[in-house]
Structure formats: C-alpha cells, structure tokens
C-alpha cells in the first residue's frame, strides 16, 4: 500500500499572494490584470478583521462609454489604480486614486486634445445585507461575495471630474467670431472691419460671407 502522506497540501493561495501580504503596512503589490475583471478585486486576502488593510496598484483597461460631450476616457485605455482596501465592521472601505487619460476637443478652438484626469476614490462597500434586513437605499455599494467591483465607483468619480470645457491650453484664444480662423494661428492682430491688416486689404473688399460658403 502506498502511503501518500499529504502533509504538504498544494498551496491554494491567490496568485500573487505570498503569505506575508496581508500584514498591515505591507508594501503595495503590483498587479496587471487584463480582461473583463479589470476593476474587480478579490477581498479574500484582506479578510474581515476590522483594521486590516491591503494596498494594491493595478493598471486596468478603461470601460466603454465613459465620458460625454467634448471629452471621454478612451475605451481600453490604461487606467492606473492606486488603492487601499481596509476591512471595517460593515464591509470594505476603498480609498485611493485613479489616473485616466482623456481625449476630446478644445471647447474654444475645437482642436483635438489629450489630457488626463486623476480622481480620488473613497467608497464603502458593504457586506450584503442579511436576508430580512431592509434592502438598502440605492446609493449604497455592496461586495459581491468575496469580490469588490470598483467600476461603478470609478465611473461615478470620473464623470464628476470630466471638464465641462476642456481646453488645449489655459490661454487658448479660440476662434475668430467673424471668420472662424484659429486665433492662435492668425495672431493677436487678427480682426475685421476698421483695422484691416494692409496685407488683407484686397480680401477685405470681397464679400466675406461668400468666401465662407466655399
Ligand atoms: Zn484650443
Ligand atoms: Zn476673423
């Protein structure tokens, strides 16, 4: 008879967890996750003892449809997450930041622009209410079993942070109200009417509206 004494069970740890990882104050671990679960974090290494915390940095792919109007987070762009998960009696408190690229167009001159936004995140994810307990009001966030899906909180934070009037530069002079020329290109002396630059003299004789129709 083979006595397969299995005193050394296969490690069933979470990938990347090295035992010492759940100590408070341990160094942030880097992880790089691709795919649909980019914003989903496993809370098992954290445990449920209030006061325990884990830091995690992760690069996640931006979800679709984040942004509106003049500026958006490009779908699939890298979002840098720098988070702390802390066990509290009601659930898990997430604090940290997310840095996301933005692309859009300048609200004044309509040139394409790229920039980035860094949003702060502070959210309490509660354990699911016990059956029979009052269903919580809609504002609350809940853990899904052992998992925490940060995406809804990330979306809300980004939408609030999107600039209403993104600018290619703080002092973008915009477009000429008369002819639509980009003032940054044509220079501060650009104008119409009384003070026509001599070089534009001949053009000033033309019917400007016809020119614009072309
Ligand atoms: Zn501009
Ligand atoms: Zn003009």
Image (cartoon, rainbow, N blue to C red):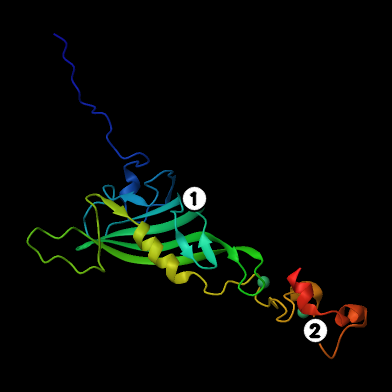
User: Mark 1 vs ligand 1: CB under 8 Å?
Assistant: no
What is the distance, in whole Å, between disc 2 and disc 1 at their CAs?
A: 43 Å
On the image, the x and y values in percent for residue 22 come to 31, 49
Q: Is residue 75 left or right of residue 139?
A: right
Q: Which residue is mark 2?
A: 191
Figure label count: 2
> Residue pushed farthest left?
132
On the image, the x and y values in percent for residue 84 come to 37, 59
Q: Which residue is mark 1?
A: 76
On the image, the x and y values in percent for residue 21 come to 34, 47
Of circles 2 and 1, which is in front? Answer: 2
Q: Quadrant of the N terminus?
A: top left
Q: Residue at x 78, y 71 (%)?
A: 185
159 vs 116, nearest the viewer: 159
Q: Residue at x 28, y 47 (%)?
A: 45
Quarter of the image where one finds residue 156: bottom left
User: Mark 2 vs ligand 2: CB under 8 Å?
Assistant: yes
Q: Is residue 47 above or below residue 98?
A: above
Quarter of the image where one finds residue 13: top left
**What crowding class fits label 1: few (fewer than 14 Cα within 10 Å), some (14-19), or many (20 or more)?**
few
Q: Quadrant of the C terminus?
A: bottom right
Q: Is residue 14 left or right of residue 166?
A: left
Q: Is residue 153 left or right of residue 141?
A: right
Q: Residue at x 20, y 26 (%)?
A: 7
């Amino acid at each position: 008879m083979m006595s397969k004494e299995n005193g050394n069970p296969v490690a069933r740890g979470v990938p990347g967890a090295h035992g010492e990882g759940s100590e408070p104050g341990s160094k942030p671990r880097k992880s790089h996750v691709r795919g649909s679960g980019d914003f989903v974090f496993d809370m098992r290494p954290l445990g449920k003892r209030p006061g325990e915390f884990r830091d995690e940095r992760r690069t996640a792919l931006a979800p679709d449809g984040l942004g509106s109007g003049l500026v958006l987070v490009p779908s699939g762009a890298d979002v840098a997450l720098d988070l702390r998960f802390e066990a509290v009696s009601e659930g898990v408190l997430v604090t940290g930041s997310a840095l996301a690229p933005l692309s859009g167009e300048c609200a004044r001159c309509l040139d394409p622009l790229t920039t980035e936004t860094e949003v702060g995140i502070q959210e309490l994810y509660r354990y699911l209410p016990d059956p029979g307990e009052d269903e919580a009001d809609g504002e609350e966030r809940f853990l899904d079993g052992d998992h925490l899906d940060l995406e809804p909180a990330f979306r809300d934070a980004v939408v609030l942070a999107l600039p209403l009037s993104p600018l290619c530069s703080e002092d973008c002079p915009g477009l000429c109200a008369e002819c639509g020329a980009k003032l940054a290109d044509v220079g501060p002396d650009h104008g119409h009417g009384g003070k026509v630059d001599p070089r534009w003299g001949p053009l000033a004789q033309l019917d400007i509206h016809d020119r614009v129709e072309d």
